[in-house]
Image: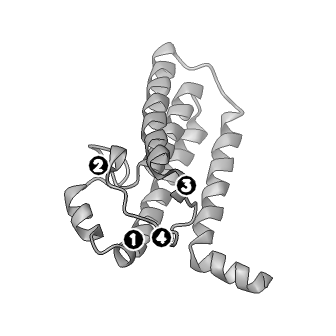
Amino acid sequence: MTINYLQDFRARGGLWVVTQLVLFGGILYALTADATPPWWLRAIGWALIGVAVALAGGGLWIIRRRLSALPAPLEGAVLMQSGPYRLVRHPIYGGLIVGSFGLAARGGNLMAALLSVVLLGFFAGKSRHEERLLTAAFPGYRAYQDRVTRRLIPWIL
């Protein structure tokens, strides 16, 4: 039973989740060494955190009970195209990235900023993997990709 669960976890993208948690842990650990940055850097950080809450929060609100940390879509899932999903295909990932940079700026923490760059690369890879699964699961996903050209951060990436 345990072997089957682990195989299923891995097949559904569980290693992406484990890596994601390790990165979040590294960023949180780096933030324990906060400095006192200049006011303007703290202001940028808070602004980014606000954008992150709107982006990720909007994505979470739209998905609600259909949320899964695993890249594979849940059985019975539907293709989300409203709210922040009109601007970007992975608003929750984008919000986590923007929020990570915001926390790093607010805390004046270079290590957290560098780990945020790693997090950006990680979510770029995870979203590419997830999009292969979404394309297989939803016949309309290609048209959605053509319509919504930004994957992670509206108007940027």
Residue 143 image point, x, y percent: 21, 66
Residue pointed to by mark 1: 134
Q: Mark 1: give few (<14), some (14-19) or many (20+) Cα within 10 Å.
A: many
**Quadrant location of residue 21?**
bottom right
Vertical arrangement, residue 123 with respect to residue 76, above or below: above
Q: Amino acid at mark 4?
A: Gly
Look at mark 3 in the image and give the residue it sits on: 65
Q: Farthest residue to the top: give it.
A: 39
Q: Are marks 2 and 1 in contact (CB under 8 Å)?
A: no
The residue under label 2 is: 86
Name the residue rendered at 62%, 53% in the picture: 23
Judging from the image, what secondary structure is the residue with disc 2 in?
helix
Residue beneath the point at 55% across and 26% down: 106
The 10 Å Cα crowd at callout 2, few under 14, some 14 to 19, many 20 or more, is some
Residue depth check, mark 3 versus mark 1: number of the one nearer the observer: 3
* First in sequence: mark 4 vs mark 3: 3
Q: Secondary structure at mark 3?
A: helix
Distance, label 2 to label 4, CA atoms, is 21 Å
Q: Which residue is mark 4?
A: 76
Q: CA distance from mark 3 to mark 1?
A: 18 Å
Q: Position of residue 78 (x, y in %)?
A: 40, 64
Q: Position of residue 34 (x, y in %)?
A: 66, 28
Q: Nearer the viewer, residue 43 or 58?
A: 58
Left or right: residue 151 versus residue 28 is left
